[in-house]
């Protein structure tokens, strides 16, 4: 019997929408189910609204810096309600664009939760309707992780709820040391909120280059964030409403009273209740859908892309995985996405831009490496008195002079690293960087003017 659709996609986030649009434009009959709103984590409760909050939090510091350039501003205040209203209007606009693009491509969108019944059938929960498809794509993304065994965890918010705070807290405590926790610590501190960060490790941003980690960690403290390391929550106690209404009990014996607790301690693939067992889809230990290089699961008719596979959880990666899937299955162009040398950013303050291997990873992979790095005050701060510094680091494979990693923490680092990512992906050598003329005056010129290899203190050049 014929199927109702050629492709049924569960999830209308970045990866699912891209895959569905490309498939529909090929002439395939495509349907998409989304239980919330089109746009997924990135547009609705992730990258986009977070970046707007970063912008908002930076203006206070910019106003202070104006004085160094002769400007004076009076009666300046921040209106949280006005800002959040503007933010959500933009999110609504972008979500509507995702919906419109799907429909214009010829796909049918169901505002409903879809669950797998078997390898070719899904059930729309609200409608109580079953639909068949020759191919099914799982693109449900991820969700914030909550430690359900932590007493009082129900009194905390996550990155899903943080965009719906009607008023700014006086004091927020953020649990975690990854990029989400770090970004929001800078955001709230920049908005004038007393901010504490509680992290189980000793230095934030595990997995990033160690120099970047230390640099950002020190900037957190310099920007006024109280950082508690090597400890976690023992209990979250609700004592009342408003200022000081929540008490955080830490495993190191300390107590912190605050208004809001935010858990940013990781994300998990959103597969609970999806019906993977019924369809026979294999998962990994953390619940992620197991796939091969072409996003195929162990069930021939079922595929998965994006954060639900827990390969490289970035929006542009989900988009490329979705496009590759559609090209392979519906356009006759077998394509797999290369997850190597993908540039990424942390929107800390200052922001981080990184591509390729960290120094530690490069040493494990290549053995001998050459390191070039520098720190300096950006030109813009010379008149402001701000002591913030830029860190730039280039990691080179000594055997063939290839640049295998570039790491930047400083103004415009994400913008710079996008362009540098092209060079690293192409296999540029340090000699290629050296013979590229500097653009002066700029921060990025340091990438092509660093000539001396960095050596640990006390090590002679001959060593």
Image (spheres, rainbow, N blue to C red):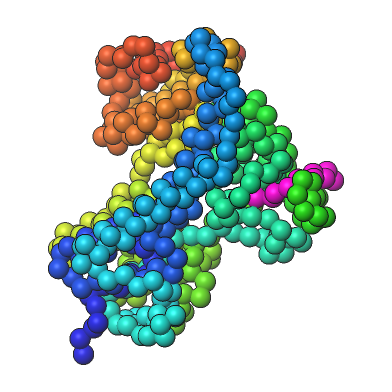
x and y, in percent, of residue 374 in the image: 48, 17
Whole-percent x and y of residue 109? 31, 70
On screen, residue 343 above or below 314: above
Taking the magenta stretch, the answer to whether it contains residue 63 is no
As drawn, 320 above or below 16? above
**389 vs 153: above or below:** above
Q: Is residue 417 visible?
A: yes
Q: Does 301 appear above or below 395?
A: below
Which residue lies at the image location 22% right of the left edge and 56% below the top edge? 335
Q: Is residue 134 left or right of residue 252?
A: left
- Whether residue 329 sits left or right of residue 305 in the image: it is left
Q: Residue 294, how many percent across, how many down? A: 29, 61
Number of numbered discs overlaid on the protein picture: 0
Residue interval drawn in magenta: 251-262
Q: Nearer the viewer, residue 382 or 310?
A: 382
- Foreground residue, 73 or 174? 73
**Image coordinates for residue 194, horizontal then vertical, percent:** 70, 36
Kindly give the residue lying farthest to the front in the view shown.
Answer: 75
Q: Residue at x 35, y 48 (%)?
A: 316
Q: Residue at x 40, y 36 (%)?
A: 355
List the single residue furthest toward the right.
Answer: 253
Residue 195 horizontal side relative to residue 41, left or right: right
Which residue is drawn at the image coordinates 56% and 45% (left, top)?
81
Quadrant hosting residue 137: bottom left
């Amino acid at each position: 019997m014929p199927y109702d659709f050629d492709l049924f996609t569960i999830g209308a986030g970045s990866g699912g929408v891209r895959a569905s649009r490309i498939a529909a434009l090929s002439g395939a009959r495509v349907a998409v189910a989304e239980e919330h709103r089109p746009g997924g984590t990135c547009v609705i409760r992730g990258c986009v609204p977070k970046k707007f909050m970063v912008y908002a939090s930076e203006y206070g510091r910019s106003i202070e810096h104006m004085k160094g350039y002769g400007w004076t501003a009076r009666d300046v205040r921040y209106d949280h309600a006005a800002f959040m209203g503007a933010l959500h209007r933009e999110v609504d606009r972008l979500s509507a664009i995702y919906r419109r693009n799907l429909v214009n491509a010829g796909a049918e969108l169901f505002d409903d939760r879809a669950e797998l019944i078997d390898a070719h059938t899904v059930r729309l929960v609200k409608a109580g309707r079953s639909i068949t498809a020759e191919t099914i794509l799982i693109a449900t993304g991820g969700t914030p992780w909550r430690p359900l065994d932590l007493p009082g965890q129900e009194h905390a918010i996550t990155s899903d709820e943080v965009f719906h705070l009607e008023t700014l807290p006086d004091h927020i405590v953020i649990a975690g040391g990854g990029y989400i926790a770090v970004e929001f610590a800078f955001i709230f501190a920049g908005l004038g909120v007393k901010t504490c960060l509680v992290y189980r490790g000793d230095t934030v941003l595990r997995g990033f280059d160690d120099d970047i980690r230390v640099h950002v960690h020190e900037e957190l403290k310099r920007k006024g964030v109280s950082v508690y390391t090597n400890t976690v929550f023992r209990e979250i106690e609700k004592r009342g409403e408003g200022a000081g209404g929540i008490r955080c009990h830490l495993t190191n014996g300390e107590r912190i009273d605050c208004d809001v607790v935010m858990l940013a301690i990781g994300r998990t693939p959103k597969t609970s209740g999806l019906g993977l067992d019924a369809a026979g889809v294999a998962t990994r230990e953390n619940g992620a859908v197991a796939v091969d290089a072409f996003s195929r699961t162990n069930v021939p008719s079922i595929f998965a892309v994006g954060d639900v596979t827990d390969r490289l959880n970035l929006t542009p990666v989900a988009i490329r995985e979705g496009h590759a899937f559609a090209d392979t299955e519906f356009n006759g162009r077998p394509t797999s996405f290369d997850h190597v040398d993908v540039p990424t950013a942390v929107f800390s303050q200052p922001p981080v831009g990184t591509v390729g291997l960290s120094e530690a990873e490069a040493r494990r992979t290549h053995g001998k490496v050459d390191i070039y790095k520098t720190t300096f005050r950006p030109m813009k701060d010379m008149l402001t008195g701000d002591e913030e510094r830029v860190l730039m680091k280039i990691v080179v494979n000594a055997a063939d002079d290839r640049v295998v990693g570039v790491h930047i923490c400083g103004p415009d680092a994400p913008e710079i690293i996008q362009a540098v990512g092209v060079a690293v992906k192409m296999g540029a050598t340090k000699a290629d960087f050296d013979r590229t003329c500097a653009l002066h005056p700029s921060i990025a010129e340091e990438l092509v003017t660093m000539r001396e290899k960095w050596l640990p203190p006390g090590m002679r050049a001959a060593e």
